[in-house]
Amino acid sequence: MDLRESTQDREFREQVRVFVEGALPGDIRGRVLDFKRLEREDYVRWQRILYEQGWGAPGWPSDHGGTGWNALQRVVFEAQRQRFLPGILTMDEWWCQGYSEPGAGSDLAALSTRAQRQADTYVINGQKMWTSFAHWADWIFCLVRTRSEGKPQDGISFLLVDMRTPGVSVKPIRTLDQGSDICQVFFDDVVVPAKNLVGQENQGWAIAKYLLGHERTNMAGVGMCKRLLSRLEHFARSERKRGKPLMEDIRFRDRLAKLEIDLLSHEWSLLRLTSLERSGNAIGPEASILKIRGSEIQQELAALLMECAGPYAIPYVAQALEPGYTGETAGGDHLNALAAQYFDLRKVSIYGGTSEVQKNIIAKSHLGF
Ligand SMILES: Cc1cc2nc3c(=O)[nH]c(=O)nc-3n(C[C@H](O)[C@H](O)[C@H](O)COP(=O)(O)OP(=O)(O)OC[C@H]3O[C@@H](n4cnc5c(N)ncnc54)[C@H](O)[C@@H]3O)c2cc1C
């Protein structure tokens, strides 16, 4: 395995840096750096800029072969690609992920939302839970039960549902940071064309597992950790303890150094796995290791950021996260969002599969339990 950067890699890195510096709108950049809330329009605007650059979906394979599908299935799949991929790239259509349900989170195969085949449609009844951004979504990709007999995993199908279909309703859930980006989605006799089935009936589990593997690799969160770390270093220079910048406090520096080392080794693990994937190996349970470490480091960084601000991190004004807020706060504008950020990041060790469940996966595959 060769982890050295080639000249091409270096040129690409530089190209990305120059592009982002020039193309990322200043208002979005400011909001992200100050941990302010982003609006739907902010996400869409940035995605369109990436799309114009040809970087709308870097992870999509250029070749979809090797599925063993018959000719008709391939035509259906092609039609789905033509129908849906352009809207995803330009973000004209916002998608959400309908996997979890009450009683089927970690034990996802226990899901009970039912889709019954009726002529050339499916009729869906049930409820999804913790669906991120469902209140903004135009479409949801859903795991549904199409067979009750046999192994639970073998009775699950993957369906695409237009959120405007009669019978779909969305109820946002208030979160610890006073946000409402996650929702419950209810399906009451929702009629969906059978052509919206992805792959074959009762074989949705394999698709879901494939997607979750990629989701977990993305959740390594190296970029997010670096952003938090650079914010932390900035605060450590400006915030003072007993008259001196926090950065000069030896105990604080120790903790900062440990986190920097953890992040560096985490980044190398990600590079190592990416290099394996590049040489044709599928990423398996290693994605779980990345997810656990990424969650831990993000949460530790957020906790240390809170400590930097000391008591000023405690008075939490939720409105201060909204763009354009001009009211007063205890410690100044730059400290407003720290508590919300800290609470919001509790989620990273839960979504995409909890840390405990990732440890089970690692134990089973690597330790043989
Ligand atoms: C912010 C956020 C966004 C989310 N977005 C989405 C989304 O867009 N789409 C979607 O489908 N889902 C989404 N989820 C749901 C997420 O995938 C689930 O919350 C997660 O899989 C855990 O399931 P659960 O909440 O039902 O908890 P449970 O499965 O009930 O787990 C409760 C506790 O028990 C532990 N536990 C459970 N089973 C085991 C076991 N076998 N061994 C050891 N410990 C165990 C867990 O680790 C956890 O601590 C989101 C969740 C959050 C918090």
Image: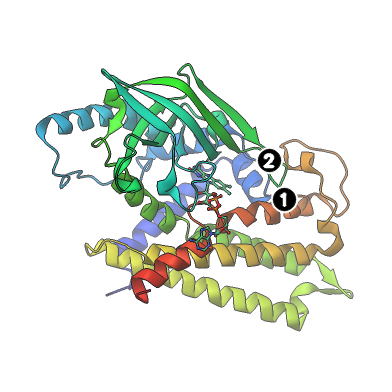
- Label 2 belongs to which residue? 179
The image quadrant that residue 194 belongs to is top left
Determine whether 263 is above or below 54 in the image. below
Q: Residue furthest left?
A: 71
Q: Residue furthest front?
A: 149
Nearer to us in this view, 343 or 50:
343
Q: Residue at x 52, y 45 (%)?
A: 103
Nearer to us in this view, 240 or 149:
149
Secondary structure type for disc 2: loop
Ligand 1 within 8 Å, label 1 CB: no
Q: Residue at x 55, y 62 (%)?
A: 295
Determine whether 296 is above or below 105 in the image. below
Query: Residue 161 placed where, x, y %?
Result: 40, 27
Nearer to us in this view, 100 or 57:
100
Query: Residue 106 placed where, x, y %?
Result: 48, 53
Please name the amino acid that badge 2 sits on.
Answer: Gly
Q: Residue at x 68, y 44 (%)?
A: 175
Can the viewer see residue 293 in this picture? yes
Secondary structure type for disc 1: helix
Q: Earlier in the sequence, mark 2 or mark 1?
A: 2
Q: What number is the disc on residue 75?
A: none
Please name the amino acid that badge 1 sits on.
Answer: Ala
Query: Residue 281 placed where, x, y %?
Result: 24, 64
Q: Residue at x 13, y 29 (%)?
A: 72
- Label 1 belongs to which residue? 340
**Number of marks in the rendered image:** 2
Q: Residues within 10 Å of mark 1 (few under 14, many from 20)?
A: many
Determine whether 132 is above or below 230 in the image. above
Q: Is residue 254 left or right of residue 333?
A: left
Q: Is residue 174 left or right of residue 104?
A: right
Say whether marks 2 and 1 touch (CB < 8 Å). yes
